[in-house]
Image (spheres, coloured by chain):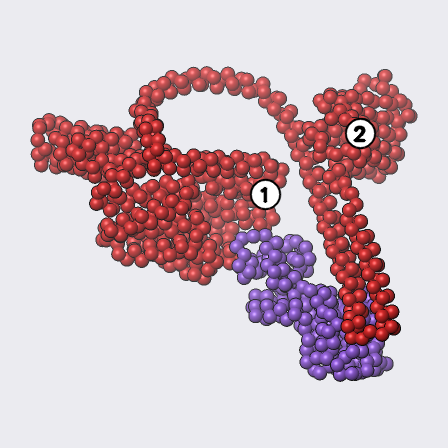
Amino acid sequence: MNVLMIDDHPTQLEGYKSILEYNEMGLSIKATKATDTKTAYEIITNPEKNPLYDIVFLDIGMPKYEEKNINSGEDLGLLIKKHSPDSKIIIITSYFEGLILYELLQKIEPRGILVKSDFDGEDLLEAFKKVYLGETYYSETVIKAKNIITSNSNFLDSINRKIILLLAQGIKTKDLTKHIDLSISAIEKRKIAIKEYFNIDKSSQDDILNKARELGLV
Amino acid sequence: MKASHCLTFIFDALLMLLSCHDETNTPKKLASIDKLLDTVYSDQLNSHQKTNILSRAKKDIYNLQDDSLKTLKIIRLANRYFYLNDLKNYYKVSHKLISHAEQLNDSANIAYGKLYLGDYFSIKSKADSSYYYYNAAEKIYKNLNEPLNHGTVLLKKAYLLSEIQDFINAEKLSINAIKKAQVSGDSSFLYECYNFLGVLLIEANQYEKSKDYHLKALNTIKKLSEDYQVYENGFYAQSYNNLGRVALKLGQYSESEDYFEKGLKQDGLKEDFPATYFALRDNFNHLNYVRGNTSSYVDKLKNSIKVNDSLNNTDGVLQSQIRLAKHYKQENLPQLSKPFAQFAYKTAKSIEATEFELEALRLLAQTDKQNTEKYYEEYIKIKDSVVNHQRRQRGKFARIEYETDQIQMQNEIMKADKAQMEYEKWLIIGASGFSLLILILWFSFKFQKSKNKLLKAEQEQQKTKEEIYELILKQQSIIKQGKLEEQRRISQELHDGIMGKLSSIRLNLFVLKKKITPEILDRCLNYVKKIKEVEQEIRQISHNLNKPIHYQNGDFNLVIKELIEDIKSSKNNFDYNIEIDENLHWDEIDSNITVEIYRIFQEAFQNIRKYAKADLVSVKINRYNNIINLVIEDNGVGFDTSQKSSGIGLKNMMSRAKKINADFKVFSDYHKGTKVELNFSL
């Protein structure tokens, strides 16, 4: 079977490959490696010149490829969806923030998500097996975030999620308007609603972040 | 007008008639006294006339034969004085009530008189005296079966305790008062107890418990006797308001809204109980704000300030002013926040509303960055004095309670009593003192005038100090920003670099678990070597973190640099270099000195800009032990120091140098540039 592996750390790819050789199904794996964004872009956007990849391992933290307006592995994921909808994507990422992972889940609809800090070889094999068999495999962090967000969908809507994420990046409330198409007062209202939801009495934004961290959202 | 004159005349005539007295308490005499006492409620007499009538009634009552009927009249007399707000006479009559009841061995009315005296001192803000009398009354009531009065005394003691924030004991007393109220069957008093305890528990942050009591209060209103039914709507509104406040604190917003709405719906509320009505509206507005509905918040607060002011409800005004200030602060509009906080601060200070005063000070400290320290100092000072006062009062109350220092306490109280008696004497002394005071004031005014000049100079210096402080603050925020960026960079390095490498090593070594062949072992050993690379990378990051950073030092250095940059222009372009000794820590130097140095720099740079035509300026600051050597040098046109009478700029520098005991020298000659040198010791 054909597997495409995208990661800018060659040793990482080396590791994936040698682990996958021990897959339970005894499949022989033909791996194509892409260690820079340009190579990955060429492979993805020219499906006719390449075999159909059954599974794509995709690292989200890929460097920018500005000529084609690719900012990260996320954009590559969208391209894969577009050019090769039959390929099953397994995202491998060092992000562990629930909100970011959830965003990736929504946008790219991968079959698997592995968080670098919490998976080992067995998990990789398990993910590979499940995805190969048409099931899904998500790291625990992802499942937890998904549960929190979907059970609170009315309040953790995409805008509120973005507000929390931006705050976590250290962006000040007054600068949020540059990132979100809302007025200051609308953002303030939303912040108050978030605080209300988190059961925070009166406070600075740090408390929103503390709570969000506690829940594994950021 | 005519009618009232006529009435007065009739009353005067009445008084004449009554002035004759004989020995027995005839019904006729008693009735005429009652009539006099009742006229106090007439709205056709002015207070002076009413006072006259009461003093006549007093004379008549005191002339009555000593019996229980006389006691009742004395009580009514005291009530009338209280009604007229004539506290001096209220006090005297209350004492009379006690001595009279003592003669009759009537302990119930002795206690009643003590209760009255307690009220008197409570109004006079003499909490310990007040507590003493309430306590004495309570002791008597313990042996009597008068649950209503007993309960009243307990509740009054609870009031005093709650004022010094002794919530635990206040709560205990209130619960005892509730028990007495239940025994007495007086629903209006029971309501008062429940409501007070509910409010007390809000202050003690026990919201769930508070809610229980407010609900009980609400249920009690239904059982009010007919006399109190006129107040029913007011009571309902008050209880709904309190319940709404509690729900708001508990975060139960829709419940809170419900309560406020119910409160506002009470008939005739705005006309009959305007204070409650506007309190409800204020709280409703605040609820909406907390829920994120901010649109009309500010307008409503401003309106609230106006309305509460017209009602003379200072607490309401203060609360709204502080909420406004808070709101503006949160919106990052300190210039709008400050004036409201200042208003609130001044008002709260003048009426001794300490809670508001503290809150206003905190807001001021946060919005008025130039005076942050000053405001916090004041805040701490007041906070300390409040705590000390509370501690002292609690101690005194405990002493009264346990009667350990009974005699000493009695002496103190007697002193307070005596002070009251001597009040009039002091009034005369005060008047003569007043004229003396005016004389002194006149002299001090003269003195002040001459002092003003000096003050002005000091003010100017203060201004400079603030200027520098501001500049340093500005630099600090730039540095802080840089620090944050550095932090972020390091975190990224750890996350992307180190963690990525470690996890890939871990993955590659995983293969060992599956199969071990010499070939695989070989490959894995390679990865073990990679761990060393990671170690080196960590060492590098750790090294970067450890680099000495002279942030604080940089502050004033940057300020000087900015000064130079300021005077540079296209016409006046020159190179410059600044050398500042790394051992020089500006924060260790007194800010008075820094200010003068800053001014000298400013002056020197101005001279360079105006006259020097230099293309190189150098600034050197060195430290040798405790001596600081400061040199400003340029390669401009210079001047003849022996000929030219020194200009204002130079004179200024000299006088400033003198202020900080610095040795000041100027070296210059035509076409040889100018060098200004300053030496001073720390």
Q: What residue type is labelled 2?
A: Arg
- Corner quadrant of residue B105: top left
**Left or right side of B641 for B114:** left
Badge number at residue B565: none
User: For the residue carrying disc 2, how many other residues have a C-alpha within 10 Å: few (<14), some (14-19), or many (20+)?
Assistant: some
Please give left or right for residue B159 compared with residue A208 in the image: left
User: At 83% from the left edge and 31% from the top edge, which residue is drawn?
Assistant: B620
- Between disc 2 and disc 1, whose residue precedes? 1
Q: Is residue A94 above or below residue B372?
A: below
Q: Compared with residue B558, is residue B448 higher up or lower down, i.e. above or below?
A: above
Provide residue B413's location: percent of width, then percent of height. 33, 29
**Which residue is rendered at x = 62% and y = 40% of the image?**
B369
Q: Which chain carries label 1?
A: B
Q: Chain B is drawn in which colour?
A: red
Alpha carbon distance from label 2 to label 1: 37 Å
Reading the image, the residue beneath label 1 is B366
Would residue A217 be seen by someone viewing this image from the given angle?
yes
Secondary element under disc 1, as helix, strand or loop, is helix
Label disc, if present, on residue B623 of the rendered structure: 2
